[in-house]
Image (cartoon, rainbow, N blue to C red):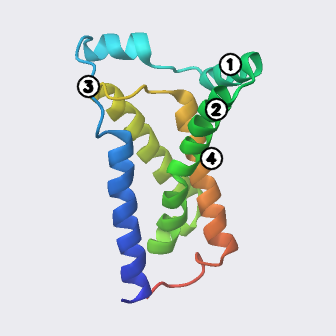
Amino acid sequence: MGMKKWFWSVFFLYCVTAVAILLLGRTPDTALSVRDYFVLKANPVPFRTMCRYVSFLLARRDFYSFSLFISNVGGNLLLFLPMGFLLPVLFSEMRICGRCFAALALTVLSAELLQGFLRVGIPDADDLLLNLAGGRIGFLLSQKLNFCGRTVS
């Protein structure tokens, strides 16, 4: 298998896994209308959720609060890191940071909104920020490893 096919296979598996993590395997909360779901559950305030996790961690200082913090922050950082890495490797147009970031932002925002519309997750500004940070780290890794400058064949 050539490198390009390998990267496309990894990208496909990543996309399927990301959709499964973000949307599948969760029971929709149909008790609320979509409008009420967004009003009552969404967090549009940046850093609100992260501050709650930090406060919880500092108040309890136990393994549970630490693992909750790490899984939320780390999971959201790692979720879009592969996309930030693979987009510039597979698409030459995405080797420009602004274009890759715009594609990541559109994808992450769409995922957050879709979770809300389907009522299977909490649309959260912090998730958006952490997902974008993870995507940016992936982009920087692809540059550092010199994947952005090569043509994958």
Label 3 residue SS: loop
- Judged left or right of residue 113, residue 87 is right
Give the alpha-carbon distance from disc 3 to disc 2, as whole Å: 24 Å
Specify the amino acid type for callout 1.
Phe
Can residue 129 be spotted in the picture? no
Image vertical order of residue 115 relative to residue 136, above or below: above
Say which of 73 and 98 sits in front: 73
Quickly name the residue at label 2: 69
- Read off the residue under disc 3: 28
Mark identifier at residue 133:
4
76 lies left or right of 32: right
Task: Name the residue at 32% across, 34% down.
Answer: 114
Which amino acid is tagged 3? Answer: Pro
| Mark sitting earlier along the chain (3/4) | 3
**How far apart are labels 2 and 1 at the CA level?**
9 Å
In the rendering, at what x and y percent does residue 45 appear? 58, 20
Q: Nearer the viewer's eye, disc 3 or disc 2? A: 2
Q: Which residue sits at x=26%, y=28%?
A: 27
Disc 1, SS:
helix
Q: How much space separates mark 1 and mark 3, taking CA atoms?
A: 27 Å
Please tell me how crowded label 3 is: few (under 14), some (14-19), or many (20+) other residues with Cα within 10 Å: some
